């Protein structure tokens, strides 16, 4: 018979559950340049002190503040370093959010754009083959 003892929560999960719970209503109030809060995978970040240092500029932070910006964050393909750096701006978690909301990321994320490089390399090879077959062999 299989062991049905639940595994104890990880240190990260325990820390997540200790975070202050913040309602979506409160998060929505923080959608200005003076007070931009980002909701990303269940965690809430006050990024006002990071605005001038964000590589994409402060506008993108304000544009995505006050709402769930998880998909936008993942679509950009932020590096692991960027994700680690966010920890210092965390002010809480979405009320009712679970540990799985943080750990089950969807979309691009974390790769730093490597997929784009692979696709570009494939396109270059295909163009080279096409050129050889259609242009050079036709002569």
Image (cartoon, helix red, strand yellow):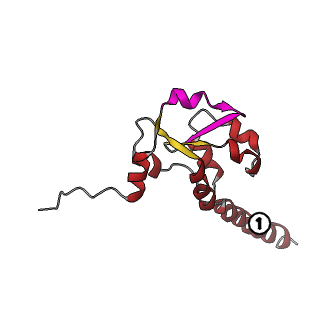
Which quadrant holds the C terminus? bottom right
Which range is magenta? 23-39
For residue 126, above or below residue 5: below
Number of marks in the rendered image? 1
For residue 61, above or below residue 109: above
Magenta stretch: includes residue 37: yes
User: What's the residue at 59%, 49% (across, down)?
Assistant: 74
For residue 34, above or below residue 43: above
Which quadrant holds the N terminus? bottom left
Q: Residue lying furthest left in this view?
A: 1
Residue 111 x %, y %: 61, 60
Q: Position of 92 compared to 81: left or right?
A: left
Which residue is identified by label 1? 130
Q: Residues within 10 Å of mark 1 (few under 14, many from 20)?
A: few
**Of the pair 97 and 107, the residue shown nearer to us:** 97
Residue 77 x %, y %: 63, 54
User: What's the residue at 39%, 58% (across, down)?
Assistant: 11
Query: Tag 1, which secondary structure?
Result: helix
Residue 110 x %, y %: 59, 58
């Amino acid at each position: 018979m299989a062991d049905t003892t639940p595994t104890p929560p990880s240190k990260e999960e325990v820390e997540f559950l200790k975070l202050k719970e913040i309602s979506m209503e409160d998060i929505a109030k923080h959608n200005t340049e003076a007070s931009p809060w980002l909701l990303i995978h269940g965690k809430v970040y006050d990024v006002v002190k990071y605005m001038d240092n964000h590589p994409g500029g402060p506008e993108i932070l304000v544009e995505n503040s006050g709402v769930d910006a998880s998909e936008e964050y993942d679509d950009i393909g932020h590096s692991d370093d960027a994700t680690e750096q966010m920890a210092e701006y965390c002010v809480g978690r979405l009320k009712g959010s679970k540990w799985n909301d943080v750990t089950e990321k969807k979309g691009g994320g974390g790769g730093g754009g490597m997929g784009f490089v692979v696709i570009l390399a494939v396109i270059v090879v295909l163009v080279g083959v096409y050129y050889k077959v259609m242009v050079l062999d036709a002569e």
